[in-house]
Image (cartoon, rainbow, N blue to C red):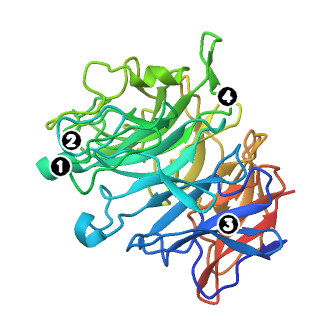
Amino acid sequence: MEKQLTIAARNHQLTNINVWTADSQWLVYDVRPSQSSFTGLTLERVNLSGESEVLYTACHGAHVGVVTASPTHPQRYLAIHGPEYPEQRGHYDFHHRRGVVVQGGVAHTLDACDITPPFTPGALRGGTHVHVYSPDGRRISFTYNDQVMRERDLREDVRNVGVAVPLGAVRTPRRHPREYDGSHFCVLVSQTTSAPRPGSDDISRAYEEGWVGQRGYLRADGRRQYSALAFIGDTRNENGDTVAEVFIVDLPLADAEFAIAGAYPLQGTPARLPAPPAGITQRRLTFSHRRRWPGIVNQPRHWLRSAPDGSEIAFLMKDEQGVVQLWGVSPCGGAPRQITRSKWSMQSAFSWHPQGGRLAIICDNSVMAVEAHSGEMQRLTIRSDQPPGSEAVVWSPDGRYIAFLRQVDGWQQIVITDAH
């Protein structure tokens, strides 16, 4: 049975993951008028009784959005924050935004910014987006766009995936109005190029990442890899066409290892993006170039999501009939597994049940629960004339509810349904 939680005459936006507090009692959201309009002023939360409260209010011309909750700290949140005093510091853009940790009504900047050479290790040179805590609440993933490369050559500003680790505050010289300090040590973990070689594993873009497993995954040799991120990478096929594939990076166990530079400087140079720490290399997991319908689909937009035990990374790809289905691939590689065999295309981002075994997704204009092993689908909401929102279909940590978005009287509202 559905229950509508928000009733105000305005839009409510859920992020695609970590929208529930750890006790499964509150949902966090922002009030942007649409996904593409970053003009919301507040971050808020609503409980299962429909009572809401403001978590944070932006000021000085800034806006906030895309809020997520900590899986371990009941009063800690992450969000995107736009620039204050935008007339002087630059208006909101992919490379003009930052992550913040919100606690007690205060926003603490997550990622330091230093755009004046020589750059600062642990600081970035642009904007971060969709900040998500790792399952243990220590590390934070994000996507990133670089201002320095954008100003050098627009084609060199390619999206990447990064990680913030708690190694202490990063201080910058603040030689420019757009420079600031941050609470975490931030690095990029993906490697991209503006000119991928056709038929190679080179990628021009890394995005829509997800943490692998609650405690990582088991490698092929039986050892546990405790921290890893999966993401979508845009490759080029032999004809030079863009084909999105699944990639993974294994991350160090110790936070201090993120501060060890590899072949290139962590902080980048005026002619090069920031580089991953030593020992971090990305692996390609899917090879779909020669399929009839190659590549991970970008409509609906979705993020890679791993089973809680780390055994499988789920994604959306068309079957041989051109129907968008749920698929899974092992973090160790191998052939992907088709999970659903639906006559209707999948219509949304998705999430796993917190104990695994099932996924929640929109299909045939309904919220569906999918059995991961068999692909059997159970309709949890009535079929509506218009599908629920595609942005977020998120299981609560206790497994009792699924939160999603639905248009009600012209406004996007937060709705939950019983997941049993």
Alpha-carbon span between mark 4 and mark 1: 37 Å
Q: Are marks 2 and 1 in contact (CB under 8 Å)?
A: yes
Q: How far apart, in angstroms, are the residues tagged by discs 4 and 3?
A: 27 Å
Cα–Cα gap, marks 2 and 3 = 36 Å
Q: Is residue 213 above or below residue 403?
A: above
Please state which of the two labelled residues, at mark 2 or mark 4, is closer to the viewer: 4
Classify residue 280 as left or right of residue 304.
left
Horizontal arrangement in the rendering, residue 150 relative to residue 142 (left or right): left
Residue 176 x, y percent position in the rendering = 21, 52
Q: Earlier in the sequence, mark 2 or mark 3?
A: 2
Q: Say the numbered circle drawn on residue 215.
A: 4
Tell whether 121 sits left or right of 53.
Answer: left
Category of crowding for the residue at label 1, using alpha-carbon neighbours closer than 10 angstroms: few (below 14), some (14–19), many (at least 20): few
Name the residue at the right extreme. 420
Q: Are marks 4 and 3 in contact (CB under 8 Å)?
A: no
Assign a secondary structure to mark 4. Answer: loop
What residue is at 51 percent from the left and 25 percent from the top? 255
Describe the element under mark 1 as helix, strand or loop.
Answer: helix
Q: Earlier in the sequence, mark 3 or mark 1?
A: 1
Mark sitting earlier along the chain (2/1): 1
Q: Which residue is mark 3?
A: 404
Amino acid type shown at disc 2: Ser
| 2 or 4: tag closer to the N-terminus | 2
Q: Residue at x 79, y 55 (%)?
A: 24
- Crowding near pointer 4: few (<14 within 10 Å), some, many (20+)? some
Residue 29 percent coordinates (x, y)? 61, 66
- Tell me the mark number nearer the camera, choosing from 4 and 3: 4
Q: Is residue 8 above or below residue 347?
A: below
| Label at residue 59 | none
Q: Which mark is residue 155?
A: 1
- Residue that carries the numbered disc 2 in the rendered image: 194
